[in-house]
Amino acid sequence: MARSDLGPDAFVSFLSESDAPAAPGTSFFDSQLGYAVRRWCPPLLGLDPHCAPAEYLERRRELGPAESARRLLGATGITDYLVDTGIPGDLTSPQELARMGGAAWHEVVRLERLAERVADTADGPARFLSRLADAVETAAERAVAFKSVAAYRYGLDFEPNPPGRTEVRMAADRWLAHRTPGDRLADPVLLRHLLWSAAETGLPIQLHTGFGDPDLRLHRCDPALLTDFARAVRPTGSALVLLHCYPYHRGAAYLAHAFPHVYADIGLALSYSGARAEAVLAEALELAPFGKLMFSTDAYGLPELYVVGAALFRRGLDRLLATWVGDGAWSAADAARVAELVGAGNARRVYGLGRADGPSAR
């Protein structure tokens, strides 16, 4: 989460994936996500639901960022935070987040940022690749998963098979020859090399798919483009977790249905769809096996986003299950089992949380 006490403009910037201002005469509060924040968060700070944005932000300022975060996070019911430690900015540490939320934390290592950090100090391609291999191995010892944003950096229509040594060495040479510290990794060969290096560790790999900020090309972020990669990587034993997915969440559900090591996580889509989250969740549940769909919030920057993500997931799933039980399509016992699987059990199994030989909760 952001450390500083955010002003109104900074706060609302976290309510959109856009890098442009809201339409004239509006703010990003005028969205499904913005309305969801106004519905679920004000009561946790002592205000009425749907209060005016200015009133909410003033109350937040009165309490201060730390107390606001403590109240908001404490109401989510989240027991474990899986934290992507590769996001730039002045953000709270995973330890601080977990402490304010009264929960455990586990690290997710962003592959591209890992490679960029190695490149900042490496002397030549041979040293870079050697240090990168060591860095991936070391990260695998402490993390519960890796994450890739190849969708942003190149797209998901990359060659599915692992690149050869010569190809990787040449790509590293090209990239480093013109790189200055801090430059982003976008070379498709090195992105593939990272994915395969991570897969060989056996840890799960989270993959951004679907919508995001304007830096990506949406048609190249369709998870269906990962079909051949999913098939090729299966022998490594690494699980692929498809994140966000919208508007391709039905396609992600198909991949989770078709491949035993593919899972879907549509948390961000639920937050952004707000009052329509139930419909999006229902579409994902049409085809995804119930052991292959996972809850998350994908929250970042604001504690409010953890609240909204948890509330919309819980409300949407409760209403869907109640309808199916009421119609006689499901038994109450089956509904309770699916709620536990999707809400917690699947993630605990895939990421090894709470397992004797898995990562320890920090």
Image (spheres, grey):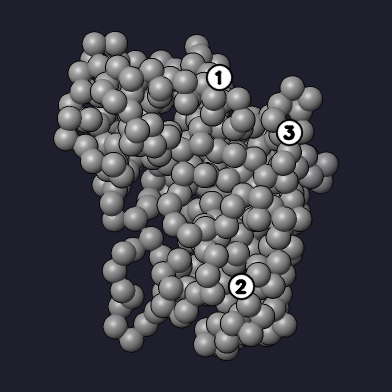
Contact? badges 3 and 2 (CB < 8 Å): no
Near-viewer residue (235 or 167)? 167
- Earlier in the chain: of badge 3 and badge 1, it is 1
Question: In the displayed structure, does residue 237 sit left or right of residue 28?
Answer: right
CA distance separating discs 3 and 1:
17 Å
Identified by mark 2, the residue type is Pro
* Residue 173 occupies quadrant: top left
Residue bearing the label numbered 2? 65
CA distance separating discs 3 and 2:
29 Å
The percent position of residue 255, horizontal first and vertical second, equals: 47, 30
Identified by mark 3, the residue type is Ser
Q: Secondary structure at mark 1?
A: loop
* Residue 340 occupies quadrant: top right
Q: Could you say which disc has been placed on residue 236 in the image?
A: none
Near-viewer residue (21 or 341)? 21
- Earlier in the chain: of badge 2 and badge 1, it is 2
The percent position of residue 185, horizontal first and vertical second, equals: 29, 37
State whether residue 152 is above or below residue 75: above
Numbered disc in front, either 3 or 1: 3
Question: In the displayed structure, does residue 74 sit left or right of residue 142?
Answer: right
CA distance separating discs 2 and 1:
39 Å
Identified by mark 1, the residue type is Gly
Residue bearing the label numbered 3? 360
